[in-house]
Amino acid sequence: MIAPRMRDLVLLGAGGHARVLLALMRAAGYSVLGVCDPHLASSGASRWEGLDVLGDDAALLDRLGPERVALVLGIGQLSTGSLRERLYDLWRGRGYAFPALVHPAAWIAGDALLSDGVQVMAGAIIQPGCAIGENSTINTRASIDHDCHIAAHVHVAPGATLCGSIHVDEGAFIGAGSVLVQGVRVGERAVVGAGTTLVRDLGPRQIIIGGAPRIRAKPAAES
Ligand SMILES: CC(=O)SCCNC(=O)CCNC(=O)[C@H](O)C(C)(C)COP(=O)(O)OP(=O)(O)OC[C@H]1O[C@@H](n2cnc3c(N)ncnc32)[C@H](O)[C@@H]1OP(=O)(O)O
């Protein structure tokens, strides 16, 4: 993990996810040099949310090399599409660093491992024994319990609850408010719909949505 204070940060993108990250960076006291966004640049705007608009990608490459700035990926990730992943790989390939960012109101166990580019939003909890892969987002108030392994480019959306010892493979999307019971595995690029409870493994590229609750009697031995 690269210490965020080593270099000034430049925010890529100016949508809702970028605004949440800007709030995180300000709350954590990071130094933000400005924002790069093709739409802002083409509109001629010089300021956005109190930041200087630095221009589009070309401006960044021309004026602010990877030795001067580190990047923050302000593009969110929905259940479809992989723009965020492609941009991350593109800029990494150009030599730029993406420090892991953690909101000061998140709680992360001392032994949890956060890879480069991980973004942990306000209210999130990451318990002992967890590892979070590159460019993954643990969004607002999501909860990752002990010994979970989250691969790269995963989005755990707001309020999702992952119980212990869960594996989430690369590029998967865990919807808002979903609950994953202990020990399940979510396959590569699979999608867990918002509010869904996952009780068994989900294969690669599978989507699970909702699911009817069932009522049954408890075994006699249980009171
Ligand atoms: C900060 C942020 O905002 S981060 C973003 C967080 N957002 C989320 O977590 C949203 C996650 N996305 C979802 O849950 C989506 O609905 C998906 C990906 C599971 C499915 O999307 P789509 O394939 O586009 O499904 P679509 O909208 O066409 O709905 C298909 C059917 O499933 C139902 N449905 C869709 N999602 C859900 C859900 N999460 N729970 C229950 N039912 C659902 C729809 O009502 C529809 O039912 P119908 O056929 O009877 O009309």
Image (spheres, rainbow, N blue to C red):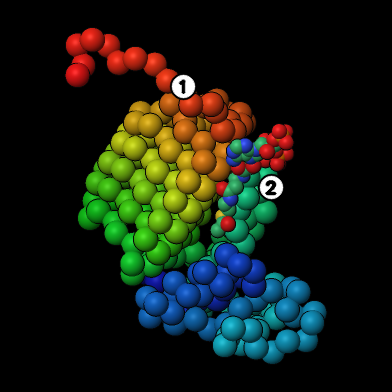
Query: Would you say residue 74 is visible in this rendering?
Result: no
Specify whether 60 is left or right of 215.
right
State the residue lying farthest toward the right. Answer: 42
Quarter of the figure that contains the N terminus? bottom left
Residue 42 x, y percent position in the rendering: 80, 79
Circle 1 is placed at which residue position?
Answer: 214
In-front residue for pair 123/97: 123
In which image quadrant can residue 99 be found?
Answer: bottom left
In-front residue for pair 126/30: 126
Q: Residue at x 42, y 35 (%)?
A: 180
In-front residue for pair 5/189: 189
Q: Residue at x 51, y 48 (%)?
A: 176
SS type, badge 2: loop
Type of amino acid at the residue the image marks with label 2: Gly
Residue 36 x, y percent position in the rendering: 65, 76
Q: Residue at x 53, y 84 (%)?
A: 33
Circle 2 is placed at which residue position?
Answer: 81
Type of amino acid at the residue the image marks with label 1: Arg
Q: Assess disc 1: are there few (<14), some (14-19) or many (≥20) residues with their C-alpha within 10 Å of its C-alpha.
A: few
